[in-house]
């Protein structure tokens, strides 16, 4: 997220995960999605290995941009909210990856009902032009709602 309260990102399938993840260390993430209201996505994210517990609200997407507000929460509150999400959860391992141009990307390797899906994201600032896309990326899926985590929590990849 940029400092202006907006998230601007591009998403790609990863065609060569072994190349993208060579030497990268990941963090296991569990995310749960509460019911959407007024087109908002409400997420609780648990990264226990890093001691991070976050509540995030995202607005409707316009192209690659959407409003985002995020705040840290206490672990016990995160656990309760996560339990309230019921089956609308995703599990993944996130790897920070530096591209050849020095730009930081994240590669998510999904597990459980989204097993087999590997995606890369790059966040852009308000003034950013299109980044150089690493050779290990496959097709861009920024405009395909199916590849957004809130959708994957309700319609897992393995059910498509």
Image (tube, rainbow, N blue to C red):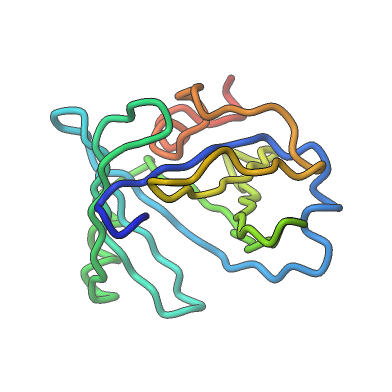
Residue 16 vs residue 143: left or right?
right
Residue 32 vs residue 11: left or right?
left
- Residue plotted at (65% across, 50% down): 109
Task: Give the image location of residue 86, x and y in percent.
Answer: 32, 45
Task: Give the image location of residue 157, x and y in percent.
Answer: 58, 30
Q: Total of numbered circles in the picture?
A: 0
**Of residues 130 and 39, which is closer to you in this image?**
130
Q: Quadrant of residue 79?
A: bottom left
- Residue plotted at (36% across, 36% down): 65
**Of residues 3 and 81, which is closer to you in this image?**
3
Task: Give the image location of residue 160, x and y in percent.
Answer: 59, 19
- Residue plotted at (41% across, 43% down): 8
**Of residues 29 and 23, which is closer to you in this image?**
23
- Residue plotted at (52% across, 31% down): 147
Residue 136 vs residue 117: left or right?
right
- Quarter holding the N terminus is bottom left
Above or below 152: residue 71? below
Above or below 151: residue 27? below
Task: Give the image location of residue 122, x and y in percent.
Answer: 56, 48
Q: Quadrant of residue 14?
A: top right
Q: Residue furthest left?
A: 38
Above or below 23: residue 84? above
Residue 75 vs residue 156: left or right?
left
């Amino acid at each position: 997220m940029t400092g202006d309260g907006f998230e601007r990102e591009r998403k790609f399938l990863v065609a060569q995960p072994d190349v993208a993840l060579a030497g990268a260390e990941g963090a296991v993430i569990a995310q749960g999605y509460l019911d959407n209201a007024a087109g908002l996505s409400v997420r609780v994210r648990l990264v226990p290995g890093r001691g991070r517990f976050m509540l995030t609200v995202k607005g409707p997407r316009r192209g690659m941009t959407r409003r985002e507000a995020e705040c840290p929460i206490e672990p016990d509150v995160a656990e309760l909210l996560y339990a309230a999400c019921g089956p609308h959860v995703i599990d993944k391992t996130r790897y920070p990856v530096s591209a050849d141009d020095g730009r930081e990307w994240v590669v998510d390797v999904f597990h459980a009902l989204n097993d087999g899906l590997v995606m890369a994201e790059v966040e852009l600032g308000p003034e950013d032009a299109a980044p150089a896309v690493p050779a290990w990326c496959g097709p861009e899926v920024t405009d395909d709602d199916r590849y957004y985590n809130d959708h994957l929590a309700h319609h897992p990849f393995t059910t498509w």
